[in-house]
Image (spheres, rainbow, N blue to C red):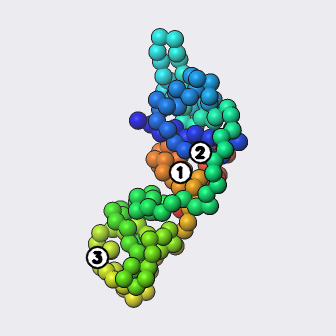
Amino acid sequence: MRDTLVLNASFEPLSTVTLNRAVVLVLQDKAVVEQSHPALRVRAAAVDLPVPRVIRLCRYVRVPFRRQAPWSRPGVLVRDQHRCAYCGRRATTVDHVVPKSHGGADSWLNTVASCAEDNHRKADRTPEQAGMPLLHEPFVPSPADAMLLGLRSGERAALPDWLAAAQPAA
């Protein structure tokens, strides 16, 4: 299933939904298609609709303010685009920059994506102690950044220019 980006009426990213949910929102006149896939269409007996990539809600939805996205292991992998922070290969695990045994926390700024080999090689040491410098510094994504990073890379590349400019530089 394709993920469709949902924008608030104010053009702020809210979430992603399945293609089916996006079509239902458009058919119920709760959303309008802001960008569609150029070659794909949804067809039924009385419906002919372009496959939406980005939809915008017709009414503004008030969202409780959150300063940052909640930390999670899958979130760290997505933030770092499944690339090891030590060697750049495909990452499958999450490594604590300051190990938990040394007082390191489960937080955005203390965790990075890592391949299993580098995670094992670094072991219970800091990157400086292990002689393994980080290729990039960890950062705290905003909730909108985390949601945009959660889109598949092909879907991210297909975002409109005005929205792609708001993407985080990971």
Disc 2 residue type? Leu
Q: Tell me what residue is drawn at x 53 percent, y 55 percent.
A: 146
For image coordinates 40% across by 85% down, the residue present is 102
> Which mark sits nearer the N-terminus, 1 or 2?
2
Task: Determine which residue is flagged by label 2.
Answer: 14
Mark 1 in CB contact with mark 2 (< 8 angstroms): yes
In the rendered image of this protein, does residue 64 appear above or below residue 101? above
> Residue 56 appears at what percent x and percent y?
63, 35
- Looking at the image, which is closer to me, 19 or 24? 24
Give the answer, above or below, for where 131 lies relative to 3. below
In this rendering, position of residue 118 left or right of residue 152: left
**Residue, disc 3:** 120
Q: Which amino acid does label 1 sit on?
A: Met
The answer to whether 104 is drawn above or below residue 151 in the figure is below
Q: Which of 32 and 35 is in front in this view?
A: 32
Q: What residue type is labelled 3?
A: His
Q: What is the spatial separation of the Cα atoms under label 3 and label 2, in whole angstroms?
A: 38 Å
How far apart are the two marked residues, 1 and 2, measured between alpha carbons? 8 Å
- Tag in front: 3 or 1: 1
Front residue of 156 and 71: 71
Q: Could you say where residue 65 lies in the image, as x and y percent from the top left? A: 64, 55
Q: Where is residue 132 in the image (x, y as percent from the top left)?
A: 40, 81
Which residue shows up at 51% across the image and 53% down it? 149
Dot label at residue 147: 1
Residue 53 position, x and y percent, is 54, 36
Answer whether labels 3 and 2 touch (C-beta < 8 Å).
no
- N-terminal label among 3 and 2: 2
Vertical placement of residue 18 versus 80, above or below? above
User: Dot 3 lies on which element?
Assistant: helix
Helix or strand or loop: what does disc 2 sit on? strand
Report whether 111 appears left or right of 165.
left
Of the numbered discs in the image, which one, if any, rests on residue 20? Answer: none
